[in-house]
Amino acid sequence: MKKRRLLLIGCVIAALLFAGCKTNEVETEDTTSSSTTTQTNTSSNNVTSGTSTTTTGSESSSSTTTTDSSDSSSSSSSTTSDSSGTKDYTADNEALWAAIQAARKAAIEAGAAEANPVAWAAAEADYEVQKKIMEAGGSSSDMSAALKDLNYRYQGLTALANAQKKKAFVDENEWASYNRASYDDGSKKVTDLTDPLKTFESGKAFFDTAVAAEKDFDTVINSAYRAIAKEERAKAFEAKKQADSVKAAVSRKVDYEQAVASFKSGDSHYVTGNLKGSIEDYIASRQAFETLFAEISEARAQALAAIEAARKRVSESEDVALAADKEAPLGNAQVEGIEAEDAKLLDDDDFAEAESAQAAAEDAIEEDVE
């Protein structure tokens, strides 16, 4: 009897346990279904609104992306992004690489390899590294820092080469004294830029220093041009006054006007900042005025010499005549070849033949008239 009771109680407990498990399973399924529904709705809302929220089993990007329902993948119209939203820098890298190519070409043409062989070799080594990356298809990662630095180094080497050429030009013409401060500053920068032991924190720093050095020598050259232009203008003006003293504007009008035009052109170029052009014009004007003065003066000198020679000949003739009169005066004696004052040189004519000729002519006219 006791065994039956225990068996009955066990069956009841088992039944209750079975019923409880079934209820939990149903509740779990309901909860899962509800969660799935909520997730689906949320995903749908994200796609519709175009947000960048990531949901399980799908990819999304900015509001400009177009969703492909077949594979739930998207792409931007301007950049390409991966599932994490990382930007693709391939296009930007290619643009920077094109700029590097142009900067490198300019550096080669400027003679950058000779300007600083060490810096050039370092830039070329970096160039080969970046070249391999770009030729292999480039990189989608941001390479702007390395590429910009290389670009600045090539541009800096070009500026250095130009600065060295301008310094040599100043030294050749001995123009340093026209602006000693700028010359010294530029020279120091060039020394630093070409010192193998001198380091620069970046390509941009090297570039800035090289550009500043080139500007220093530009300042020296412009100072020299300005001073020389003033000197040549003063010389041209003095030459003009000399030409005016010999009336060049009258005797050589065309040439004189051309010289004046060159002088005015020099003034125009000086005002507009073309100092080298103004110097050339002033020199041309000065030379033209000097030529006019010299040629007109020479012509006048020759004319005066001819007049003086003529006067001298007349004076000498008078002196000879006076000396002859003194040495052998003519007096009243008869001179062979010279007739006497009352000598009869021609026989008298009674004009009888002339009257006969006139009568014959009158007869002929009358005959012609008839």
Image: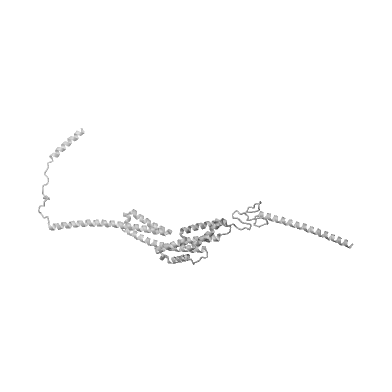
Is 333 placed left or right of 168 in the picture?
left
Query: In the shown orientation, is residue 11 left or right of residue 260?
Result: right
Total marks drawn? 0
Residue 246 visible, this angle = no
- Residue 151 x, y percent position in the rendering: 51, 60
- Is residue 168 at all visible to an observer of this figure? yes
Name the spot of residue 226 as percent of width and height, x first: 41, 62
Classify the position of the C terminus by image quarter: top left
Res 147 → quadrant: bottom right
Quarter of the rendering containing residue 229: bottom left
- The residue sitting at 81% across, 60% down in the picture is 17
Looking at the image, the residue that sits furthest to the top is 370
Q: Position of residue 45 (x, y in %)?
A: 68, 55
Q: Quadrant of the N terminus?
A: bottom right
Could you tell me residue 222's position as x and y percent?
43, 62
Q: Which residue is farthest right?
A: 1
Furthest toward the left, the residue is 333
Furthest residue to the front? 3
In-image side of 138 versus 309 (left or right): right
**Residue 218 or residue 25, whichever sits in front:** 25
Frontmost residue, 306 versus 153: 153
Colouring used for the render? one colour
Can you say whether 118 is above or below 76 in the image? below
- Front in this rendered view, residue 85 or 62: 85
